[in-house]
Amino acid sequence: MDSTRIRPVAQLIATAGIFATLLVMGMQFTVHHFTSKESIIFPTIILSIVLIYHLLIDRKLITNKNNLLVSGSLILFAVYYVLNINRDAPLKLEYITYFLTIVLLFTAIVFFKNRIVDKRMWIIFVFIYANVFFLPTLLSINKLIAANSNGIIAFLLLFFCLINLKEKNIILRSLNIYTTILLLITLNTATSRAAVIAFFIVALIFFATRYFQKFTFYIVASIILISPVITAFAMYIKHTSLSQIITYRSEIFTLENVFNGRDWIWKDAADVVINNGMIWTGLGNNVEFELLGGYLHNLYVQVFFHSGVIGLLLAGILLITLALAIGNAKVIDFDFRILLGYFVAILFLQVFEGHLIYKFEIISLLMWIIIAFLIRKSSQEVSVPNKDDYTQQNV
């Protein structure tokens, strides 16, 4: 069969697989929750097979030094993280399929010239998601559970609305504007302080990028290097006078404690690793922290707990390669500024929420999709016509 006939079918199947996986993952934060980490393995495997098939028939690839460097770093980290298990604990296959999905999606978005998901489909997906999971809550039909996580989901979904603000089709544009308003209302009512701050970070970076675009790499790299330092700092100042001053100021300006219990969770998790003499390799990805279902609310503590100093170094290499690719971007336009704002906001969320490597969450997958879009955009040459920009045709 002619590959030109196969490609639209493969794109349709891949699109359906991606959206179905995201919808199923998103259900765990709603009253419609019926999935477990194990139940998502089958659709994830199906999605992986479809993406591999799409990769095999799509000969038009975007390859450059930055794309290859980032993808290589991601694969290196993923392989180590997946294989680093504790033999005294049961093997958990969900990590294998989870990281396989991330790597395949990242590869498809960054390298495929023939994009697997049409741009307009994102408008429809976000419209469906917002109306199914958020609208009933806002109308008080359903009770909002995991409010903080839902706030972050709303924040991440807003990305797809913002990049489609220039949509010309009147019906899709109306749907997009409606969904944007609905998500902003959800963001405001979800009581997620982290999500609201992240949204303001996007706005700040969007307007400030034109003034510091020459220093993008240094700014992003500084944020990456400072983030684990802030984490360690918060872990060990709890009982100091400085901690009391920070808490007092935080309660005045935000009406909440800036630590909010995260600091002692981080310290307890780090102490478990240190006391077991597993500093270099961590406890393995199949061992969970005894509280909060293993969720440690911090990327760096989560990586250290599961994969130790080696994992932290590999994660640091991955983040720095992302910063290098972003710093080499040649097209600094409306879309790039939104993408950069979201990336900086995602880095902020890694300190107080994490999620970037946490198991089987729509939040994690959406973050990686957005980062992949940014790397693709960063590889765009000035001479490339607008029709090749992912926001003009497909994503």
Image (spheres, helix red, strand yellow):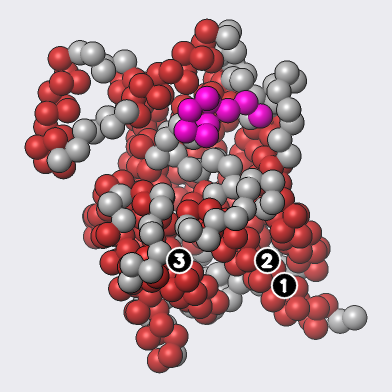
Looking at the picture, how far across and down is residue 250, in whole percent? 16, 34
In the rendered view, would you say 98 is above or below 47?
Answer: above
Looking at the picture, how far across and down is residue 261, in whole percent? 32, 28
- Looking at the rendered structure, the kind of residue marked 2 is Gly
Give the residue at mark 3. Answer: 133
**Residue stretch rendered in magenta on the structure:** 286-294
Label 2 with label 1: CB-CB less than 8 Å: yes
Decide whether residue 329 is among the magenta residues: no
Residue, far bottom: 170
Residue 189, can we see it? yes
Work out how far the residue at label 2 is from the one at label 1, CA to CA, in angstroms: 6 Å
Residue appearing at x 58%, y 76% in the figure: 118
Give the residue at mark 2. Answer: 17
Work out how far the residue at label 1 is from the one at label 3, CA to CA, in angstroms: 24 Å
Looking at the picture, how far across and down is residue 82, in whole percent? 69, 34
- Looking at the rendered structure, the kind of residue marked 1 is Ile
The local secondary structure at tag 3 comes to: helix
Q: Is residue 225 left or right of residue 14?
A: left
Q: Which mark is residue 13?
A: 1
**Residue 237, image quadrant:** top left
Looking at the picture, how far across and down is residue 138, in whole percent? 33, 68
Q: Which mark is residue 276?
A: none
Q: Earlier in the sequence, mark 3 or mark 2?
A: 2
The local secondary structure at tag 2 comes to: helix
Residue appearing at x 23%, y 33% in the figure: 258
Label 3 vs label 2, nearer the camera: 3
Decide whether residue 288 is among the magenta residues: yes
